[in-house]
Image: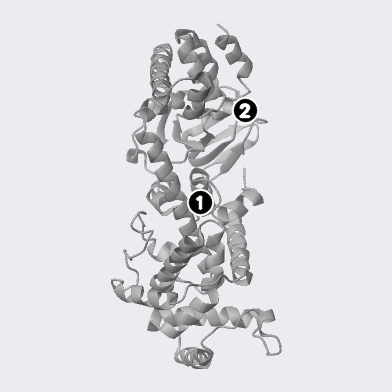
Amino acid sequence: MNSHIDTELLLNYSNGNVEPALSLAIALHQKQCKPCRQKIAAIESSYGQNLELSEASRIENNSFERLTADLDKLPTSDNGVSKTSKSLYKKNIDIVDFGEDDTLSYAIAAINRPLFNQLSDFNYDDFEWQKLSSKISSVALELYDPSFKVNLLRFSPHTKIPKHTHLGKEFTYVIKGDFKDHKGKHNAGDFIACDGSDEHKPIVGTSGCVCLAITDAPLHFTGVLGPIFNRYASY
Amino acid sequence: MNMQAQRQVNENLVYWSAHTILRQPIYSFMGEPSPSKAEQASLCKQYIHAIAFEQDKNAYKALYIYFAPKVKTFFKQHASASHAEEMTHEVFIRVWQKAKTYQADKANVSTWIFTIARNLKIDLLRQKRIVEVKLEDSQSDLHIAEDDVHEELVSAYDKIKLTNNFKYLSNEQKNVILKVYYEDKSHQLAAQELGLTLGVIKSRIRSSLKVLRHHLRNQSE
């Protein structure tokens, strides 16, 4: 099944307005999915045109002179790509050099790039798996993203996941293997968005499955489980 | 690039460095024949090429004068004017450093500069968030305990199991957990509403999570 990402999400992604966890999954998906990649390229191109047509802000006096002075301080290297430069921000941000890849740079934070590479060139042994049951293990990934919980989930072949609905939003990126649910079969590289309207009981395929699961922080239990909690709260 | 093409680029550069400034889009130069969009785009590409292979500061300046005020406008949506100025500065440092990685056949220069600016914006916003989250973490040592239980909270089919375990909590603990996890209140707000100090809230959450985790673990084994 081919699950493409909806345009609105791609628009936000391309503008850098999507939460770190979600943009990681989108970046992973578009690497595998040509139509989405082309769509993103088209969106970025129109954002580029917007930039070109946008209003000009006044630049401070001497700013170009300051810039060229800074350029002269840059360490020179043969390929013209240097690892460090002086600036207000680089002191605080761990800037990862994208090298040749920069032209096609994905809209993800530099600090998440090592994780991105680890996930796109996936290897079980890179992670410390925690067994949740005999058939499911997981790794909690820290992206410092308060809006989502990010887990790697690994399922044994043929695992049946109990029927459930999503109380909040859930985004899944299939890293390896496949699974089936009411929407169809999801293969490696697919990006699936679920919300409260999706009730499903996924079944994992013959070779097992590894997913990147991105879920709203548990805050969204609000209301939905309200009645149950009110009952307990009144004890 | 072959010799002839290179010469063409050089001639263009001589011609255009005489102008120093790339022309603004159509409306800015009424009365003068304006370069078409396509011409403009191809000039920008030549400039990047000149920066990459000849460290041409005139070409660099032309691009700066043309794009910097616009890039600054982009950052002003997210930062103060002085930050926007610094971010713009940073974008152009990267333009200089990474000109060789620009692939003229893949995207226009405006697109390329946009993606550089956008990624810097992501890093900036991201950096802010990390500072906030770390700040939150440093205020309490409970994020490890919370994370473990979140794990269990996340899976939908464990939820009922979790609520069944609320009977193991004291009323005080239950009130705090409900406020923070189910009514989506900050620790601070929960403290206010319950008339407790932040410290008490945090320690109650910690002890509650410990209890819940203990019981959930026992049941799953």
Colouring scheme applied when the structure was drawn: one colour
Disc sitting over residue B142 in the figure = none
For disc 1, the marked residue is A27
Residue B121 locus on image (x, y percent):
49, 57
* Left/right of residue B74 with respect to residue A88 in the rendered view: right
Label 2 residue SS: strand
Out of B128 and A115, give the one closest to the viewer. Answer: B128
Please tell me whether mark 1 sits on a helix, a strand or a loop: helix
State which mark lies toward you, 1 or 2: 1
State whether residue A104 appears in this view: no
Q: Which residue is mark 2?
A: A200
Please state if A150 lies on the left or on the right of A11 as rendered: left
In the rendered structure, which amino acid carries the disc numbered 2? His
Q: Amino acid at mark 1?
A: Ala
Say whether disc 1 or disc 2 marks the residue closer to the N-terminus. 1
Residue A219 occupies quadrant? top right
Residue at position x 51%, y 41% from top? A174
C-alpha span from label 1 to label 2: 26 Å
Residue situated in front as seen by the camera: B95 or B202: B202
Answer above or below: position of A158 versus B215. Answer: below
Residue A26 picture location, percent across and down? 53, 48
Whether labels 1 and 2 share one chain: yes
How far across and down, in percent of the image, does residue A61 sit?
Answer: 46, 76
Residue at mark 2: chain: A
